[in-house]
């Protein structure tokens, strides 16, 4: 069931750009929001460097491609950003992803700076699962 739901959302996303506005899902992101896909694997974020602009919404699609759990932890970044409706719900600035889970959220960064991104699972960051999010004016 989860697999089917994930597949359906991928198909919906693929069709998104060709669909008329009236056919879009109610909680889908506005069509001109830039989308960035970040893949989580053992033990890396790809890409591991994001460059975002203050005040410009971005749709983040997080894809856990691995057979294990990971998280996308950037508490200082999320504390300095606004999470728009229709986003995956999470708390404490940390998004937990099950094996092969995909989640999406729309974020508006508000404060320029360089923020650390990491997976907080034991030793994952040590093995290279970390990155940076630059927010530029
Ligand atoms: Cu990890």
Image (spheres, rainbow, N blue to C red):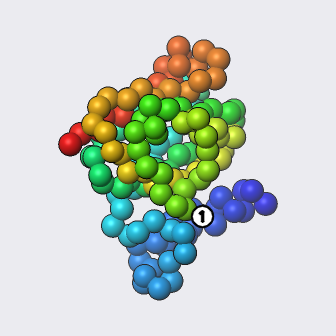
Q: Nearer the viewer, residue 68 or 24?
A: 24
Residue at image mark 1: 9
Quadrant location of the C terminus?
A: top left
Position above or below: 55 against 71: below
Position above or below: 87 against 63: below
Q: Nearer the viewer, residue 47 or 95?
A: 95
Position above or below: 41 against 107: above
Query: Residue at the spot x=51%, y=68% of the render?
Result: 28
Instruction: Tell me which corner region of the image, top left, top right, bottom left or bottom right, holds residue 30.
Output: bottom left
Relative to 121, is 111 on the left or the right? Answer: left
Residue sitting farthest toward the left: 137
Residue 131 appears in the picture as rendered: no
Quadrant location of the N terminus?
A: bottom right
Instruction: Tell me which corner region of the image, top left, top right, bottom left or bottom right, holds residue 27.
Output: bottom right
Locate residue 48, reporting x and y percent.
Answer: 40, 32
Relative to 8, is 58 on the left or the right? Answer: left
Q: Nearer the viewer, residue 38 or 117?
A: 117
Position above or below: 54 against 1: above
Relative to 55, is 74 on the left or the right? Answer: right
Q: Secondary structure at mark 1?
A: helix
Residue 107 appears in the picture as rendered: yes
- Quarter of the displayed picture in which ligand 1 can be seen: top right
Locate residue 116, reporting x and y percent.
Answer: 42, 26
Locate residue 96, reporting x and y percent.
Answer: 64, 38
Query: Residue at the spot x=61%, y=44% of the render?
Result: 90
């Amino acid at each position: 069931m989860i697999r089917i739901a994930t597949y359906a959302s991928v198909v919906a996303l693929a069709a998104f750009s060709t669909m008329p506005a009236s056919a879009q899902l109610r909680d889908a992101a506005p069509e001109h929001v830039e989308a960035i896909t970040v893949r989580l694997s053992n033990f890396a974020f790809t890409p591991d460097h994001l460059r975002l602009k203050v005040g410009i919404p971005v749709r983040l699609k997080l894809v856990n491609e691995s057979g294990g759990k990971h998280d996308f932890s950037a508490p200082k970044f999320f504390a300095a950003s606004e999470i728009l409706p229709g986003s995956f719900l999470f708390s404490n600035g940390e998004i937990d992803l099950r094996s092969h889970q995909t989640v999406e959220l729309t974020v508006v960064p508000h404060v320029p700076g360089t923020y650390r991104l990491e997976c907080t699972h034991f030793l994952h960051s040590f093995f290279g699962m970390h990155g940076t999010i630059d927010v530029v004016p």
